[in-house]
Amino acid sequence: MKVKYFAWVRERIGKAEETVEPPAEVRTVGDLIGWLAARGETYAYAFEKPKVIRAAIDQTHVKPDAAILGAREIAFFPPMTGG
């Protein structure tokens, strides 16, 4: 699946997107955040406060317990403010 990173999540990881193949036990957005955070120092830094990270599956906002099975694209971004 393609994973996209936005704003300071992208800056901390050092890339805008990548294709990943998480193991079968990674079933939800929350699981994916944990798996990504374990991939290295930059990922751990980007996901150090997982409760503030927002996610979208195939351009639809989802909660951490959303299933990722069949997702083509998952995006991670910090909370947005309006103006």
Image (cartoon, rainbow, N blue to C red):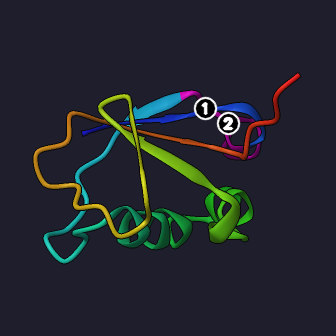
Residue 72 in the image, given as x and y percentages of width and height? 21, 33
Q: Under tag 1, what secondary structure?
A: loop
Find residue 48 and report its horizontal and vertical position in percent: 71, 70
Which SS type dominates the magenta stretch?
A: helix
Image coordinates for residue 17, horizontal then vertical, percent: 48, 30
Q: Residue at x 19, y 77 (%)?
A: 25
Q: Is residue 78 above or below residue 29?
A: above
Q: Hey, what amino acid is under mark 2?
A: Arg
Relative image position of residue 46 (x, y in whole percent): 70, 56
User: Along the horizontal axis of the image, is 24 left or right of 8?
Assistant: left
At label 1, which amino acid type do we have?
A: Lys
Question: Dot 2 corresponds to which residue?
Answer: 10
Q: Which mark is residue 48?
A: none
Asked whether the residues under the numbered discs 2 and 1 touch, taking CB atoms below 8 Å apart as contact, a structural biologist would say yes
Q: Earlier in the sequence, mark 2 or mark 1?
A: 2
Q: Which image quarter: residue 61?
A: top left
Residue 15, numbered label? 1
> From the viewer's perspective, is 13 left or right of 65?
right
Q: How many marks?
A: 2
Question: Which residue corresponds to the image point at 64% horizontal and 32% vertical from the top-left?
Answer: 6
- The residue lying at 49 percent from left, 47 percent from top is 55
- Give me the residue at 48% from left, 64% from top: 33
Q: Which residues are magenta?
A: 9-16
Quarter of the rendering occupied by the C terminus: top right
Q: Is residue 59 above or below residue 51?
A: above
Q: Nearer the viewer, mark 2 or mark 1?
A: 2
